[in-house]
Image (tube, rainbow, N blue to C red):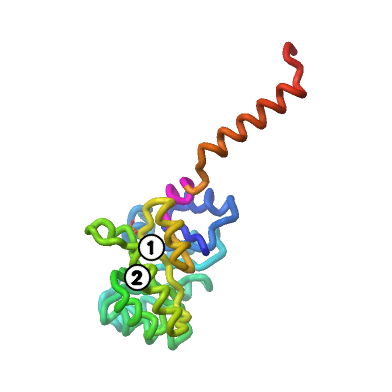
Amino acid sequence: MKFFLDTANLDELKKGASWGIVDGVTTNPSLIAKEGRPIEEQVAAICKIVDGDVSAEVVSTEANAMISEGLKLAKIHKNIVVKCPLTRDGIKACSALSKDGIRVNVTLCFSAGQALIAAKAGAYIISPFVGRLDDIGWTGMELIKSITQIYRNYGYKTQVLAASLRSPTHVIDSALAGAHIGTMPFKVLDMLFNHPLTDKGLDQFLKDYAKAFQPQNA
Ligand code: E4P
């Protein structure tokens, strides 16, 4: 499973990248807005930190405008993946950009039917939002299971990116469901490290070693 960081914050990305386990980055207009720099500058800076797919989302809502915005974003760096929302115009833009060889991440997917549409439009990535479905009382993970199954049935090449992941359990369940990618906030990636038995075990190892080899009253 590929791990993507769902952030536009450069400090978080540097820290994650230093662990050698970050395969890419997803951003959205809200995440870019939080950093206070125009998207072109911010994603260019991100591409210098992480050598992998970096999703940059269009903010136009009409297909032709999305296409020209997407073409501009794609020129920033070879790793840019243009993100389009799952609307009729977004799908029209996805079809056109994909035919032009530009990789598109179709975002804001909340149903298996929408995921089928994105695959048919040649999307490189589909982003189903797990946490936001949980928020309205649905089981977001069921959507990941359905999409991976449907794509397998027909051999679609579109990668399933489990998005809106809010906990380590979301990451593990997405991996069990066969998602190709999980994108998560830095906090969730950091939490994946934690286990009390790791801390307890290490503490004991170091104490035993010190007792055997370090002078007691030095
Ligand atoms: C995905 O690309 C989205 O940016 C993201 O996962 C949304 O997550 P949220 O629902 O926590 O905002």
Is the C-beta separation of discs 1 and 2 under 8 Å? yes
Tell me the amino acid under the disc marked 1: Ala
Disc assigned to residue 130: none
Disc assigned to residue 163: 1
Label 2 within 8 A of ligand 1 by Cβ: yes
Category of crowding for the residue at label 2, using alpha-carbon neighbours closer than 10 angstroms: few (below 14), some (14–19), many (at least 20):
many
Q: Residue at x 43, y 71 (%)?
A: 160
Residue 92 in percent (x, y) is at 32, 85
Label 1 within 8 A of ligand 1 by Cβ: yes
Viewport quadrant of the C terminus:
top right
Residue 201 in percent (x, y) is at 60, 35
Q: Residue furthest left?
A: 136
Tell me the amino acid under the disc marked 2: Thr
- The picture quadrant where one finds residue 33 is bottom left
Disc 1 from disc 2: Cα separation: 9 Å
Q: Residue furthest top?
A: 217
Q: Start and end of the magenta stretch?
A: 184-191
Residue that carries the numbered disc 2 in the rendered image:
107
| Marker count (numbered) | 2
